[in-house]
Image: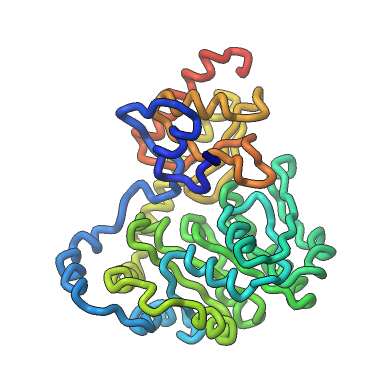
């Protein structure tokens, strides 16, 4: 069995590592808002259920109108998807047999989709030594030879956020070389002080922005995401999208979630508090970590190159971290953790302290 491709479904990481799964576990491998879905969903759940006997709108017209109004863009520049994963899959179809540049480490789905569609794949590695800094001018040589570039911002798995100035500099280089920039903003709404990238669509027809409602609103079972791009790109994507790919409940949920600013602000404040508490603990215990702007972070014990021993220790203690063996450039040297509830984060600290006690040479 290969290493699991994604977080969640922890039974597979236990199977891979031959560790017996404890009765009580905490899954830190899935980057979902620990505050749970907004109450507006449970308050309206009976009404949502009433739609199950109806075919959903294949054009998602009502949700498109709400999203477009909120962000001041034309509905023809918008595609609603069955999660961001469907949109990435559709992008793979229009990039078939083209040359694609991946900034690594990055969400593994980009490479998988590109492989399926027989793309020529090139990698540019960002490194921990520079804090995974992105310097667009260093990419210009590679960009000259590719048709599209994937940039996850904030990055998954590091959580590093690249400011608007850096993204715009990258877009200028890419536009000059007829290269699309696919900007995956699945976690953008966790970033405090986020600079809106949507206005860049007016200047750069080569920009495609992907967003997900799964992470912030804790609805991975619903599957809902969307993309903004030029009308031409959206029309190409729609040609490959299957009829009724988004179910009726998901469409209604999307409408209910538009404008949930109080929930978003509450989440951001909570994440900031928990990160301060966790990062202070990591400093004291001499763990290395990524200075994440999102709701997850990378962690490693610097006494070990490969973190498998720490991963196994955590699994034996009911703590499920996300391995990084399928993140090129990380290759198991880090573990990724979501930020969970205060109690769960405290339990993680307790197990990590126990690890340090049993490995005094790593202090």
Tell me the residue at 64%/58% (across/down). 162
Choose between 119 and 37: the one closer to the eye.
119
Single out the residue that lies furthest toward the right. 141
Q: Is residue 301 left or right of residue 77?
A: right
Percent of width and height locating residue 166? 70, 63
| Whether residue 345 is situated above or below residue 58 in the rendered picture | above
Question: Would you say residue 76 is visible in this rendering?
Answer: yes
Tell me the residue at 73%/55% (across/down). 123
Q: How many marks?
A: 0
Tell me the residue at 60%/32% (across/down). 300
Percent of width and height locating residue 350? 42, 23
Choose between 343 and 261: the one closer to the eye.
343
The image quarter containing residue 8 is: top left
Percent of width and height locating residue 259? 35, 70
Q: Is residue 38 left or right of residue 199?
A: left
The image quarter containing residue 143 is: bottom right
The image quarter containing residue 345 is: top left
| Whether residue 145 is situated above or below residue 322 in the rendered picture | below
On the rendered image, what quadrant is the C terminus found in? top right
Percent of width and height locating residue 56? 29, 78
């Amino acid at each position: 069995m290969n290493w699991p491709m994604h977080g969640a479904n922890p039974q597979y990481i236990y199977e891979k590592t031959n560790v017996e799964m404890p009765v009580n576990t905490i899954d830190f491998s899935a980057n979902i808002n620990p505050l749970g879905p907004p109450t507006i969903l449970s308050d309206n759940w009976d009404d949502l259920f009433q739609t199950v006997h109806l075919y959903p709108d294949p054009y998602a017209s009502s949700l498109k109108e709400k999203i477009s109004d909120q962000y001041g863009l034309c509905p023809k520049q918008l595609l609603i998807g069955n999660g961001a994963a469907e949109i990435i899959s559709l992008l793979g179809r229009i990039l078939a047999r083209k040359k694609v540049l991946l900034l690594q480490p990055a969400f593994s789905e980009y490479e998988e989709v590109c492989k399926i569609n027989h793309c020529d794949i090139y990698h540019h590695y960002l490194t921990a030594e520079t804090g995974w800094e992105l310097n667009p001018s260093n990419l210009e040589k590679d960009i000259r030879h590719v048709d599209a570039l994937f940039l996850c911002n904030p990055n998954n798995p590091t959580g590093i956020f690249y400011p608007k100035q850096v993204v715009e500099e990258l877009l200028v280089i890419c536009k000059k070389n007829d290269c699309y920039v696919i900007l995956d903003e699945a976690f953008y709404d966790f970033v405090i002080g986020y600079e809106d990238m949507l206005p860049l669509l007016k200047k750069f027809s080569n920009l495609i922005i992907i967003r997900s409602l799964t992470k912030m609103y804790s609805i991975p079972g619903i599957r809902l995401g969307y993309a903004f791009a030029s009308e031409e790109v959206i029309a190409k994507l729609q040609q490959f999208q299957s009829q009724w790919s988004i179910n009726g409940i998901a469409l209604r949920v999307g409408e209910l979630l538009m404008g949930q600013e109080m929930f978003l602000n509450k989440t951001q404040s909570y994440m900031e508090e928990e990160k301060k508490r966790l990062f202070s603990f990591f400093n004291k215990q001499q763990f290395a970590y990524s200075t994440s702007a999102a709701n997850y972070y990378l962690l490693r014990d610097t006494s070990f190159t490969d973190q498998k021993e720490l991963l196994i220790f955590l699994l034996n203690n009911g703590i499920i971290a996300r391995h990084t063996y399928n993140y090129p450039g990380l290759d198991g040297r880090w573990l990724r953790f979501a930020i969970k509830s205060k109690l769960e984060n405290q339990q993680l600290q307790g197990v990590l302290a126990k690890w340090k006690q049993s490995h005094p040479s790593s202090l």
